[in-house]
Each structure stands twice: as C-alpha cells, then as structure tokens.
Amino acid sequence: MLYGQPDSRRLLILFAATTLVPTIGLGVLGWRMVEQDRALASQRAAERRDHAADLAAAALTRTLADLELELRGTGSGLNKDVVRIVFEAQGIVERGGTALPYYPATRPVPELPPNLFLAAENLEFQRGDSPAAIRILEELSKWKDPAIRAAALVRLARNYRKIGESKKALATLHELARPEEVSVNGLPAGLVARQGAGLLLESTGRKEELRREAAALCADLRNGRWLLNHTSYEFAVEQARRWLGADSSNSESLDRLALAEAAESIWKEWRQGAPSTHAARRTVWARQQSILVLSRPAQERMAVLLVSPQFLQSLKEFVALREAHGMDFALTDAEGRVVFGNPQVPVALQSVRTASATRLPWTLHAVSTASTEPSVRSTMLLAGLAFMAVLILGGGYFVYRAVSHEVALAKLQTDFVAAVSHEFRTPLTTMRQLSEMLVHDRVSSDDRRQQFYQVLLRESDRLHRFVDSLLNFGRMEAGRISYRFETVDPAALVRDVVGEFRQEAWKNGYVVELAESGALPAIPADRESLTRVLWNLLDNAVKYSPECHTVWVEIEGAGKRVMVRVRDRGIGIPASEQKQIFCKFVRGAAAKSAAIQGSGVGLAMARQIVRAHKGEIAVESKVGEGSVFTVLLPVVE
C-alpha cells in the first residue's frame, strides 16, 4: 500500500456512501416499478382473455344455432367433420355430411325375383355348363334395372373364373365396381366387386395387383364409400389387411371411426328408449374423442347431427380470435375430459366460462399464448436503471481511483520532502560543526585542519549534486529540459563515469569492477544526462549493498543496441515493487525500514532520460540476492 490504512478505510466508506447506497435505492425503486408494470400488464392480459372468452362463447352459440338448422334440414349445407343421420326402426333412412366407415344399421334391400337367374344357375351348378350360363347372364347384364344388372355381373364373373377366363372375370368385376347405389346379396355391389377381384387375384398369384386392389379397398372403406353396418365393415377391413400383409398399416380415419362409434352408441340408446337421447345437446365419448351430439328424437324417427372436435377447433371465429387477441382456446366436457386444446395451464393465464353460464355443452377456456417475457416498457425501464447504476458505480469508481491516486501522491510527496530534508540536514550539520571548529581555532594540528577542509569540500560536492539532481528532475517534470545529442563512444563514457565514481566509492570502502567486451559502435547521446543515469545506478548499488562492498559494471553489444548492466549483491527489491520504483517519489519498503537515505526521484529521472534516448531500462532482482539494472541504448545507424 502506498498510503495509510486509515485513509484507505475512509475512502472505502466514502465510496460506499456515494455509490452503493444510491445504487441500491435505484434497484429497489426499479424493482417496485417493474412489479407494478407487470401487475398492470397481467390485469390487461386478463381483460383481453375475458373479452376473447366472451367472443368465443358467442361464436360457439352461433355455431350451434347454425348446426341445429342443419339438423332440421333448413341449413345452407353441412361442413367437413359433421354427420347428419336420420334413424328409423328399420335402420338408416337418411345420411349427409361426412361419410362414415360404417353405420349402426342399414335398411333391408328388396330381394330380386327367385326365378330370374334360375336357368343360368341350373346350367352352372347342375349341368356344369358355364359357357351356356354365360350367354344367359350376358343378356341379363344388359338390363336397365341396376339391381338385376349387378346380380348378373356377379354370376357372370364367377362363371368366367370357372372356365379360366380370369381377365374377363376381372373386367366384369371392375364393371360391377362402378359407383352405383345397388346391393348384391345384402352388400353394396362395389364392395362385392372389390372383394371378388381380390379373391381372383389371390387365387392366380398376382400379388402386386392384389396389393393395389387391397389398398383401393381400404381407401374406399376409410372414406365411407358404401353404406355398411359395423360387422360388414370389420370383415372387409380384416380381409383387406390380410391381402396387404407386411404393408398393412392402420390407415383408418380415427375421426370418422369416432363419429361412427358415437352414432352406433346413440342408435343403441334410442332403440332401448334411454332418456339421454331426449337431450338436444350433449357429448359422447368415443375413441378418446368427445363428439358433440345434436338430436331431435321422435316416436318413430330420430335425427342426429354428430360434430367432431376438429370441426369446432377449426372454426373461423376461433382462428380470427387467436390472431387478433393472441389467445388459444380449449373445451372440456361435463366430465372434465378435453375436447380440444390444452386447458392444463396455470389459472392465472386463462379465463374460464362454465357450461352453466354459457348454456353450452362444454366449459370454455381462453388461454394466453403471448410471451411471458418482460414488456418493452419494463425492459426499457430496467435498461435505464441499469445504465444509471453503471454510471453511478463507474463515476464513483473513477472518483475513488482519482482520490486514491491523489492521496498516494500526497503521501509520496510528504515522504519526498522528509527525505530531501534529511538529505540536506546531514551534510549541513557536518559542515556547520566543522566550520565552527575552524572559526574558533579548535583544530589541534594542520593535518587535522586539512582533513576538515576535505570533508567540507566533499559534503559541498554532495549537496551540489543533490540540488542539481532535484533541479534537473523539476525541469524534466515541467518539460523544459533540452538534450544535446552527439555521437558518443559508450565504452569511453562508462569508463569515465566508473573511474570518477571509484574515487567516491573508495573512500567508503567499495570497489567497482568494470567488464568490457571489445570495441562497440557509437551511440547518439547527451553525455551529461547519461552520466547522471550511470552515476545514479552506481550510487544506488552502493547505498543498498551494506554487506557486499563490490559493484559490477558490464558493457557489451546487443545487436543494434548497446547494453550496460550495473549489478550488486545488496538487499534486493521485492517483485511487487519492481515496477513502482521507476515512479517518482517511490522508495522501497526495505530502504525505508533500513533508514537508507534517498529522495525517490533518481530512478524516475533515469527512466525519463533513457526514454528520451529511445532506449529501455529494466531491473531484475531477488530479495537478499541483489539487483541487476540493465540499460539498452540504440547505436548510430
């Protein structure tokens, strides 16, 4: 630390008071404002949900009213995923809308006259004369009555197969498969043709054609091409799957199967006289789907409208509300089962309209789909507060750094003044004492007098050098010093400085050893300034080597530069102080504790002079092992 601990604590307390406290206050205020903004946004979102829920309930009410008109047969036409069926005791008498794979019951088909095909059957079965039977059946297949023609084509295909005319048999069955509402033996003619073609292809080993025929049969069954009961449908499906083999897959329409299962359930309830069939609006659970049932029961007839969840979910009103309000919707039936959508969201994110409130057969849920991220206003508010907090903390930090620097500088200046005062006091005290002894003639001999004169001269020179260094440092700090560069022999310059310093060091018992590496290139330098640098390094080496009285100086070439080293085995410099000692007024802690005299400007001045020569100065040191100061100077190019 470059300043006292109490000052550091006071600065930290001041920093906390001026930055942290306002920052915390801003944070609390910002949090409160963001919370209020979020509460307001939640309230607005709830209002939008309530409004959307009311609009959705109204849309469902209008949709049910339109569907009831369709149930009465006075509507504008049935939509997809809606089925209209009219029951009577004999079976289905009317069907409309989406075709179902099967129906609860089909009305019996009038049988053909028994003697119509008697002659052909006698030839086929009793006499085994299929060609003769074919001639009779070909004439019957030309009749205008679709039922007679269909029955004749079935028998004609069978006889072609018996005589080995498989192509004609298959062509006859394809002709039979033409879409006509006729039955053969109680089954739709198209279904009989598909099944007959499959059996023919199976018996002749034509597997690829059989798979295509089976796939077409599955498609017809799935799309509800024929009016079938449940048993006939299941038999046909199993037969088609067997023909498909490994390619078989459950490609049935689950939506249509759910509608068919719901229709069968309602038929059974109506036949049994269940009271539930008298409800005008209700839901039926079939194949994990909730089917809406609108009914008009009567004594001998019942009209039913079946609506799938897909129809409700795809209502144009719902799509428009989703886009306009950013909402999604869900319906649950009276047992809490999901009709469509996802009502399993937190209560705070949905608005609910119960069946009792809307008179609908479901509970309506309006769910927010908008992002739960902070609003733009909250984001901007947080960003503004964060910017202010950063500004306060950053400003406080820079103020803290500036004040800390000023405190440290003031402490260094105080130490510098004390060191300079000490540097002046010691030689002045000596000179005063010697001067008093000489003035009052208290000298015992001429030799003693001569020694006093020499001491006075040495201390005067010391003061002169010290004052001169302070004046030069002041001029450097003010930028008023000028350098007179000339071409200088670095080896000669170092020899001259070392020779002059040896005389001073010898008096205190120190030895300076110089090592040269031969001829060196000249350098551009200000001789007086470089002399001051080398003298300062040598003087420091002597001052900070109280035990080892030898200082080593080396000079050698280093590429396009000349390197000068000053090495000692003194007290050394800690690694933490090696960068600071080149700053003005800085002195190491070891020097202070050992009471070694110094002002703290010598190395700072040396660095400025070396930099002015476009050179470098560095130190390598270990505590207790000494220091090596290296100066690198460029040569003349």
Image (cartoon, rainbow, N blue to C red):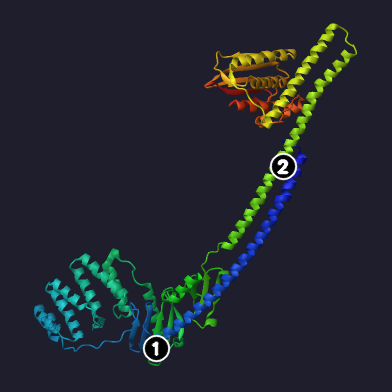
In depth, the one of 628 and 277 nearer the eye is 628
Front residue of 35/347: it is 35
Amino acid type for the residue under numbered disc 1 = Arg
Q: Which residue is mark 2?
A: 403
What residue is shown at x 84% (from left), y 9% (from top)? 448
- Is residue 569 visible in the rendered image? The answer is no
Q: Position of residue 520 (x, y in %)?
A: 55, 16
Q: Helix or strand or loop: what does disc 1 sit on?
A: helix
Which residue is tagged 1?
A: 72
For the N terminus, which image quadrant? Answer: top right
Q: Dot 1 surroundings within 10 Å: few (below 14), some, or many (20 or more)? A: some
Mark 2 belongs to which amino acid?
Val
Can residue 98 be seen at all in this image of the molecule? Answer: yes
**In the picture provided, is 176 more to the left or to the right than 275?**
left
Q: Is 443 left, or right, of 474 in this rendering?
A: right
Q: Position of residue 212 (x, y in %)?
A: 24, 68
Q: Looking at the rendered structure, which numbered label has been put on residue 521?
A: none
Residue sitting nearer the eye, 416 or 142: 416
Q: Give yes or no for contact between labels 2 and 1 (Cβ–Cβ under 8 Å).
A: no
Rendered view: 374 above or below 190: above
Which of labels 2 and 1 is toward the front? Answer: 2
Sequence-earlier tag: 2 or 1: 1
**Separation of marks 2 and 1 at Cα, in angstroms:** 92 Å
Q: Residue at x 45, y 86 (%)?
A: 280
Circle 2 packing at 10 Å, graded few (<14), some (14-19), many (20+), is: few
